[in-house]
Amino acid sequence: MIHKVSVTLAVIHLVSVFIMGYLIASSSDGSAVMAWLLYLTIDFPVGWGMVPLAYVVEALNFVDSIGSNGEYSIYRDIPNFWYPAIYIGVVGTVWWYYLPQLILRSIRWLRSGRSI
């Protein structure tokens, strides 16, 4: 039973990441990438790991988001589009897979009355 709940939550999360990615990519608003910040709350606390790693990704960015024609392309924007999408898609989905199992084990541990 708990395995089905874990898989269901992970799939729902992954589908939401794909939908968010599509909505961001199809938006004409340049600040649409800020929608990824919603996942800082949804994937709490593991979502916050994205923040310090973002500085590393930005420092290592070797692709200019402005193409040869001088126009901005969301698909070339690694620090603002691809990095959050991959991080949230992988780490957040794994978090939602293991969260029900973690809660169940915590409840069992509390009911057992064992001390630390």
Image (cartoon, helix red, strand yellow):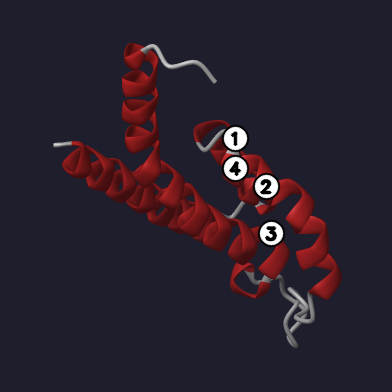
Task: Tell me the quadrant of the picture where the N terminus can be found.
Answer: top left
- Closest to the observer, 32 or 56: 56
Q: Name the amino acid, label 2.
A: Gly
Mark 1 or mark 3, earlier in chain = 1
Kindly give the residue lying farthest to the bottom in the view shown: 68
- In the rendering, at what x and y percent does residue 47 appear? 60, 42
Kindly check if marks 1 and 3 are in contact, taking CB atoms under 8 A apart as contact: no
Kindly check if marks 1 and 4 are in contact, taking CB atoms under 8 A apart as contact: yes
Kindly check if marks 3 and 2 are in contact, taking CB atoms under 8 A apart as contact: no
Q: Is residue 42 left or right of residue 49?
A: left
Q: Which residue is mark 2?
A: 49
Q: Secondary structure at mark 4?
A: helix
- In the rendering, at what x and y percent does residue 35 appear? 58, 43
Q: CA distance from mark 1 to mark 4?
A: 5 Å
Kindly check if marks 2 and 4 are in contact, taking CB atoms under 8 A apart as contact: yes
* Residues packed near mark 4 inside 10 Å, few (<14), some (14 to 19) or many (20 plus): many
Q: Which residue is mark 4?
A: 47
Q: Which residue is mark 3?
A: 80
Q: Which residue is mark 1?
A: 45
In percent of the image, x 75 and y 88: which residue is there? 68
* Residues packed near mark 3 inside 10 Å, few (<14), some (14 to 19) or many (20 plus): many
Q: Name the amino acid, label 1.
A: Pro
- In the rendering, at what x and y percent does residue 110 appear? 39, 15
Mark 4 or mark 3, earlier in chain = 4
Q: CA distance from mark 2 to mark 1?
A: 8 Å
- Closest to the observer, 60 or 2: 2
- Tell me: residue 39, above or below residue 70: above
